[in-house]
Amino acid sequence: MTLMETAKNKKVNDLITTIAEIENLKEEFIRAGIAAGTIVVPKNINRYFKKIAAIGLGLKTKVNANIGTSPEHVDLAEELLKVDAAVKAGADAVMDLSTGGNLTQIRKEILAASPVQVGTVPIYEAACRTVAKGKKISQIEGELLFDVIEEQAQQGVDFMTVHCGINKANVEILNRQNRLTGIVSRGGSFLVKYINATGKENPLFEQYGRLLQIAKKYDVTLSLGDGFRPGCIQDASDGPQIAELSVLGDLVLMARESGVQSMIEGPGHIPINQVEANVIIAKRLGHGAPLYFLGPLVTDIAPGYDHITSAIGGALAASYGVDFICCVTPAEHLRLPDVHDVHEGVVSAKIAGHAADIVKDVNGAKKHDDEMSKYRKDRNWEKQKEFCIDPIKFAKERAKLPSLQQDVCTMCGKFCSMLDE
């Protein structure tokens, strides 16, 4: 019995109890949310990990960190350091997006090392296997894709991005559009190439029932991917994006009927004045399913600073109802992120999420700020370190101060407004 089926049967298990304790909410609230599909708890039946996180309505905004190798850079030790850095920075989940090296072994090591939920994008591995056979990506076979999904689920992956909303009808809409950056979703581009080259339907859409059977078998949460997400401000909120989103909403209902947890992924690049509308539409068409947004980035001109552009968009999006933020690192659009990039990206997303939680009146969010302010007023540096969002950086910056100036900072010194005299 899946977690959703348990909740639908009005039963409370240890997982639901744990989530209620973590969120400081009643068990019935968590159970009802899982049963309705407005809350998900990604956890594979074949996996145990320490830090359980629920995603959805009424809960703290959660943050995911993307890690993984590329064909040009394969270093498993570095990827494990990224997992550690992400978790220490406050990530609630990590996604292994590896496309280089022994993908099965890399994923095995990441699953073993991660104390938080782990997600994947199975079509990446299917594409890698296809290319390794000397074939084009457009020649990906549906059977291979489902084999990969089953293998990853059996291995213990907690949630999977699957681009099920891309179908022949929506590709026709895309082909008629004059998008500035086309398709920026890697997985989405693979499926569009397949459809355009073969004239066949997307296997993930055509055989969605089969996908649900696998997900149900291992209680894998489906993260319904936004293959047509806008990759630039010009393409935001266009026809292909909304057409795909409409399909995803229907797939959410089918998943719920099968007892499978699901959430919907969102854009992408969106100007500030369209963020609220995108969230409202996604929640409406998605029947209240948890939303998982990449940022969104609110401008296209800041390579090297996209952890900032995405934090701006992420704070807005989460304040309007987004439940899960995928962090964007300073390396976005430039190169494969390193360990430091992952830390910076997670912290930026955590700031965005917490800022939104204050607005959403999430339990404990404002109290956290009040505690921090109290300790700032008292110049209690140790307590400030405990309550700040990045204790690692806090400690490093404080260590730069001269020993005789530990009571105040060097900005105001003896003229500090917080001093009693």
Image: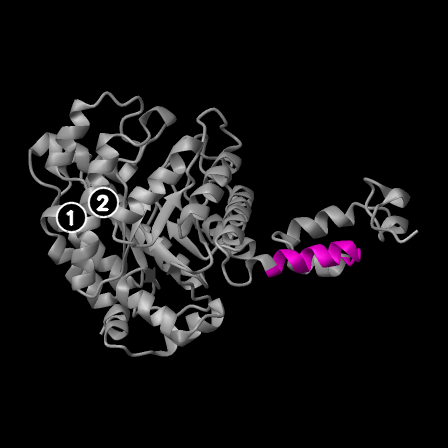
- The answer to whether the residues at label 2 and label 1 have Cβ atoms under 8 Å apart is yes
Residue 14 relative to residue 77: left or right: left
Q: Is residue 121 visible?
A: no
Identity of the residue drawn at 53% across and 55% down: 90
> Could you tell me which residue is drawn at 47 percent across and 67 percent down?
23
In the image, residue 264 sits, relative to residue 305, either above or below, namely: below
Describe the element under mark 1 as helix, strand or loop: helix
Q: Position of residue 358 (x, y in %)?
A: 54, 53
Mark 1 Cα shell of 10 Å, populated few (<14), some (14-19), many (≥20): many
Residue at position x 11%, y 30% from top? 197
Whether residue 83 is visible, yes or no, is yes
Compared to 115, does 377 lie above or below?
above
Please name the residue that numbered disc 2 is placed on.
163
Left or right of 200: which side holds 238?
Answer: right
Instruction: Tell me the SS state at disc 2.
Output: loop
Residue positioned 58% across, 57% down in the render: 366
Span shown in magenta:
367-380
Percent position (x, y) of residue 353? 49, 50
**Dot label at residue 304:** none
Q: Is residue 314 left or right of residue 293?
A: right
Give the main secondary structure, helix, strand or loop, of the magenta stretch: helix
Q: Which residue is mark 1?
A: 204
Pinpoint residue 91: horizontal percent, then vertical percent.
49, 54
In the image, is residue 407 above or below residue 279? below
Residue 350: in magenta span: no
Indicate which disc, 2 or 1, sits on the residue closer to the N terminus. Answer: 2
Q: Amino acid at mark 2?
A: His
Q: Amino acid at mark 1?
A: Leu
